[in-house]
Image (cartoon, helix red, strand yellow):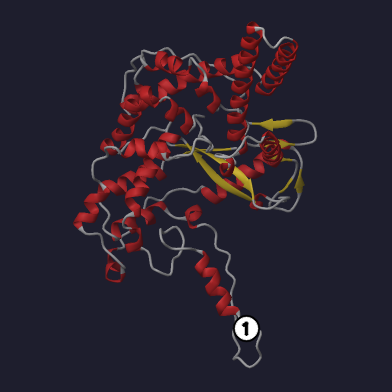
Amino acid sequence: MAGEMAEPILHLPYTTYSDHSPLVLKGDSRDVQVSMFRFDNYLALSPGFLASVHNIWQHPVIGTSMYSVTRKLKALKPVFRQLRRKKGDLAMNVKLAAGFLEIAQKLLQADRHNSLLLQLENCCRLVYLKATQLEHVMLRQRAKLQWLKGGDQCSKVFFRRVATRRANKRIFQISDSDGLVQTDPTIISRVFVTYFQDLLGGDRTERDIDLHFLRPWARHILTEEEAYALIRPVTVDVKTAMFDIEEDKAPGPDGFSSGFYKAAWPIVGEDISKAIMDFFTTGRLLKQVNATILTLIPKVRTPHSVADFRPISCCNVIYKVISKILVCRFREILDLLISPSQNAFVPGRLISDNVLLAQELFSGYNQCRLPPRCALKVDIRKAYDTVEWDFLFATLRLFGFPVVFTRWIEECVTLPIIRLL
């Protein structure tokens, strides 16, 4: 793209800093962990937050709207790192504030009519409340407990949750494809990379698949009105999709959560909207935006092999907004295309219905008076892990999706940069 080759006017210093370690591979002697930037939502409560964002955001950058946004976001990272250093240890700040408040209250008890001590106690109380608020926001973001978002503060629960998540990220040993137990961090990481390269990788053949002969058996073909609704101009959908993303969701490779965009929306909202609408106009997505972190979530309490981990893709917030806009439009016609027997991922349908149906079918299998029968339990992996891209696009053309909408989907799913963490 032309935007990627342009030289920005804004000076971007290169710096490295250890902010986040989504996965730690631990062996006998040393730990191997991948570090990356992560925006802490409590920084948005700082008095100079908006001023810092405005100081960077006001500089012009030569290039496309999306390129300008990515360069400014990169320039903000050292600013937030410095701001986080100034905040210090939040837990220690709470203890210090509590100590000062206790001293002020003891002095006030000895002389309750002293106006200066009243003001001192009030100031110490405000400092303590501010420190606890910052710690609460930090712990809530680390713990990922959505059900406690609107409840009372409970540091014990948050600390335990953070400790549990941190312990689950450590891998001491793993069994390779030959069944051998590996404990060396370098070999463990190589086993993971090899497994997921074989699972998610592969060379694309770029075959021209034609499925139009299946149209007589298609459940529904999009009409002109339905096709136009998919590619209608994007207007207010950007802000709605942005504010619909939870602030505590895991960030993508750029490290910025939706909490940053929501807090700085008066400053960055216009440029973010232009960048997203630029995608729907040109159909091009920069590699800085279309990047993914592959986080591994254990399926069982004590995983022994790589297959015991579930890969979860952590995408950048701008990419999430684009995908949410596409999903919201696709959702309007989803139930027309998918068979009623498919009960998952369709609004108004529940996958639990299949569980109830299976229980009804198997209720009489142990009765001798019934004729002989058998049941097959088939282990099918997620379809998205092994689907052919060209088959996906051919299926979209089969159902009559517009060419523009198909290109949007192709741009989003065929050019990811995956980092395994």
**Residue 235, position in %: x, y?**
26, 37
Which residue is most to the right?
A: 28
Which residue is most to the bottom?
A: 369
Residue at x 51% of width, y 69% of height: 354
Labels in figure, total: 1
* Screen quadrant of the C terminus: top right
* Left or right: residue 31 compared with residue 48: right
- Compared to residue 153, the image places residue 16 above or below, namely above
Label 1 Cα neighbours within 10 Å, binned few <14 / some 14-19 / many ≥20: some
The answer to whether residue 344 shows anywhere in this view is yes
The secondary element bearing badge 1 is classed as: loop
In the image, 421 versus 351, the foreground residue is 351
Q: Quadrant of residue 184?
A: top right
In the image, 226 versus 294, the foreground residue is 226
Which residue is most to the front?
A: 113
- Compared to residue 345, the image places residue 84 above or below, namely above
In the image, 46 versus 327, the foreground residue is 46
Residue at x 76% of width, y 36% of height: 27
**Residue 16, position in %: x, y?**
57, 19
- Under mark 1, the amino acid is Tyr
The answer to whether residue 39 shows anywhere in this view is no
* Left or right: residue 2 compared with residue 353: left
**Residue 101, position in %: x, y?**
69, 17
* Screen quadrant of the N terminus: top left
Residue at x 41% of width, y 15% of height: 56
Residue at x 61% of width, y 15% of height: 122
**Residue 397, position in %: x, y?**
29, 56
- Per the image, the residue denoted by label 1 is 365
